[in-house]
Structures are given as C-alpha cells and as structure tokens.
Amino acid sequence: MVPRGGSDSQLARISMMDNGFEILDMEMGYQTRFKTRSGGWYYVDVWSIPKIIGKKVIWKFDLESFNEWRESLLEDGVIAPPDEDVLNLLIDAKSKRVERNAMRTHIPAIKENYDKDLKMLDLMQEYKRTGKPIPVPKEKKKVKKSV
C-alpha cells in the first residue's frame, strides 16, 4: 500500500539494480512534473521542455545540459566510471567489426557502415586514453528534394 494512491516502484527498482543499473535518488532534482488537462501529473526529466502548439505538445530536449549533468555525476563520484575491462571488450568488438568490413569497402552500404564504425572506434579509443567525454559533432540529415 502506497500513501496517497501513488504507485510503488520498488519491484522495478530492484529488478533494474539486479541487471546492473545504478538507481539515482529522486531528491537529486533530475525530474519535474507538469499538470495535465485531466488534473493529473506528467513526470518528465528536467531537460525536456514542452512547447504547446494547438492541442499538441512538442518536447524539446536540452542534450548539452544533460551531458554536463552526466559528466558532473562522474566527477562528483555519484556514479563510478566505466570499468576498464568493459571498455576493452567493447573496443575489441568494434575493432573486429572494422577489420572484417575493411576488405569489403567496395560495396557502398558496407563502406558507409565501415566509415561510421571506424570513426566510432577512434572516439572509443580516445575516451579510453583521456577518460573524459568527447564531443561528437552532429551530422546534418540529408534532405531529399521532391521532383
């Protein structure tokens, strides 16, 4: 029984912790709520900003602030940095994929995936060396012209 008719998240939290997730306290201020038209509450993270257009709500996400908050969690010791062995496993898997596709780059689809994987591998190795988040420039989506 939960006071005031709320839901009990204890089972979900225990299940996630068993699967290796780190559960942060709600008092850390990363969640906010908005009143709904029906009188209830809509809970969302503090980096999501609503924009109401007519009857629709469009959510914008502040990725830069979110990444700064995640970096502060690492710096303050709230969460542990990634394990060195896990990083090595991920880098090895990506290296094998790059090596496997290196000889088939004459196929355009594989060449595109190879280039992305090679860039990702370089970023992974740089993170392992520095231990600091690496800013990744956002690629612009190609727009197809209508005829």
Image (spheres, grey):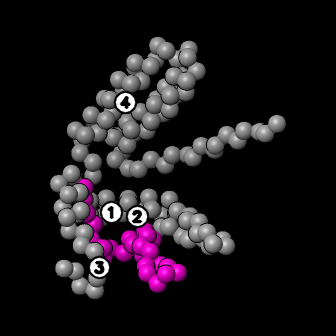
Which of discs 3 and 2 lies nearer the camera? The answer is 3
Q: Which residue is mark 2?
A: 69
Q: Which residue is mark 3?
A: 6
Q: Is residue 76 magenta?
A: no
| Mark 2 touches mark 1? (CB < 8 Å) | yes
Bounds of the magenta segment: 21-46
Distance between mark 3 and mark 2 Cα atoms: 28 Å
The answer to whether one can see residue 134 in this image is yes
Q: Label 2 sits on what residue type?
A: Trp
Identify the image quadrant of residue 83. Answer: top left
Identify the image quadrant of residue 73. Answer: bottom left
Q: Earlier in the sequence, mark 3 or mark 2?
A: 3
Query: Looking at this rendering, what residue extends furthest in the right direction?
Result: 147
Which of discs 4 and 1 lies nearer the camera? The answer is 4
Q: Which residue is mark 4?
A: 94
Q: Which residue is mark 1?
A: 73
